[in-house]
Amino acid sequence: MNTVTQPSRLASLDALRGFDMLMISGGGAFLYLLGGKTGLSFIDAIAEQFHHPDWNGFTFYDFIFPLFLFMAGVSLAFSLKSGLAKGISQAELTKKVFKRMLVLFVLGILDKNAPVDIFDPAHIRYGTVLGRIGIATFLVALLYMRFTWTQMLYIALGILVLYFSVLMLIPAPGFQAGDLTFEGNLVGWLDRTLMPGRLKQKTYDELAMTTQLSATCLTIFGCLAGDILQNSAISVAQKLKQLSLMGVIGVVAGLAWSPFFPINKHLWSSSFILLTGGMAFLMVVLFYWIIDVKKYTRWTFFFKVIGMNSLVIYLACRFISFGETSRLLFAGLYGHAPEPWHEVFNALGGLLLVWLMLYVMYRHKIFVKV
């Protein structure tokens, strides 16, 4: 792709990743619990943005995982370019990313199935968040080392158009072509027919194989953004302009496509990918401009602590009951508040415990990477 140079780490990327992980690790749940308790309409409106629609539609909460897939692409561009600058061969980098994919796939199965009954594989859920990230980064790494920036963009757009065409033109058995309902969509039929193991929604799984390619486009877009950020041949103003333009185009295109291909996180529809990809570009612009350009950095420490150990906090929230620990430690205090507020304060205490654990790791320079 671009001329190989040694890239530098951007503080904004750790902060944005930390913001995203905060929402995943309890921040979103805390905001949702505020709904209907403050008497303030704008708080209720924010709370409504932190639950997933049943099918079609979009809330800010739907953006959280796509943003992480996008940020995985940004980080991948920095990592691969750094490896190439150090003289590591493409074959060695491919091997490294492949191993990472396998580790994330196994951790994902553990996350979604614990305790895992390896003697009953038919009831194991194989579609997972971590597995999706691992597969996406592996595929995009292969593309990044073999194609130009423009070619990768065309590949992503081609995948989204192809995905739309397949769902519109090929009917699921027993249904008409273009049926995008919960019961009649082709994605669900393919998952039921070809995907081994247990499906989350019984008739389909939003993290199964059928939606993997469209979701991978977010990681491609993130890789393109990472390449722009590392391009020493253009000015900071040009980087901001290019990233902003990509973001606006993505949001507008996603909304324009939605009447024909509804915005739907369950299907990872092409309109959903463009909308969330555009939003992710704009979030990168915002954080990059404030933190790395304007140098307003003091407020970022809270998020940086989380972003530096994103895998740890994701798995810790699955295997450690921060909510129960919060109850044991803080219920004597918040128990005197009105009862509807107990769950809010308990969630806040859990968030505090999460951050303190990550802060201790940060202070001791313990950073877990795969």
Image: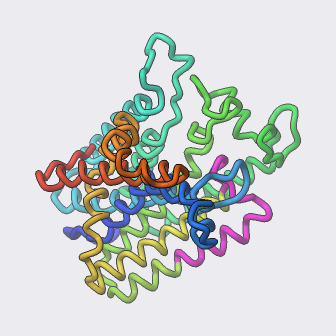
Q: In this view of the protein, which residue sits in the foreground, 342 or 144?
A: 342
Which residue is found at the position 23% from the left and 68% from the top?
9
Taking 190 as reference, is 37 above or below it? below
Q: Is residue 368 magenta?
A: no
Quarter in which the N terminus is drawn: bottom left
For residue 160, what is the image quadrant?
bottom right
Quarter in which the C terminus is drawn: top left
> In the image, is 75 to the left or to the right of 298?
right
Residue 353 in picture, x, y percent from top left:
30, 49
Residue 195 in picture, x, y percent from top left:
61, 28
> In the image, is 50 to the left or to the right of 137?
right
Residue 138 in picture, x, y percent from top left:
40, 46
Q: Can residue 315 be seen in this view?
A: no
Q: Does the magenta stretch include residue 249?
A: yes
Q: How is the image coloured?
A: rainbow
Residue 293 in picture, x, y percent from top left:
30, 84
> In the image, is 262 to the left or to the right of 339?
right
How many discs appear?
0
Taking 297 as reference, is 134 above or below it? above
Q: In this view of the protein, which residue sits in the foreground, 171 or 233?
A: 171
Taking 262 as reference, is 369 above or below it? above
Tell me which segment is drawn in magenta: 246-269
Q: Is residue 129 visible?
A: yes
For residue 145, what is the image quadrant?
bottom left
Which residue is found at the position 44% from the left and 63% from the top?
222
Which residue is found at the position 34% from the left and 36% from the top?
320
Which residue is found at the position 64% from the left and 27% from the top?
194
> In the image, is 296 to the left or to the right of 280?
left
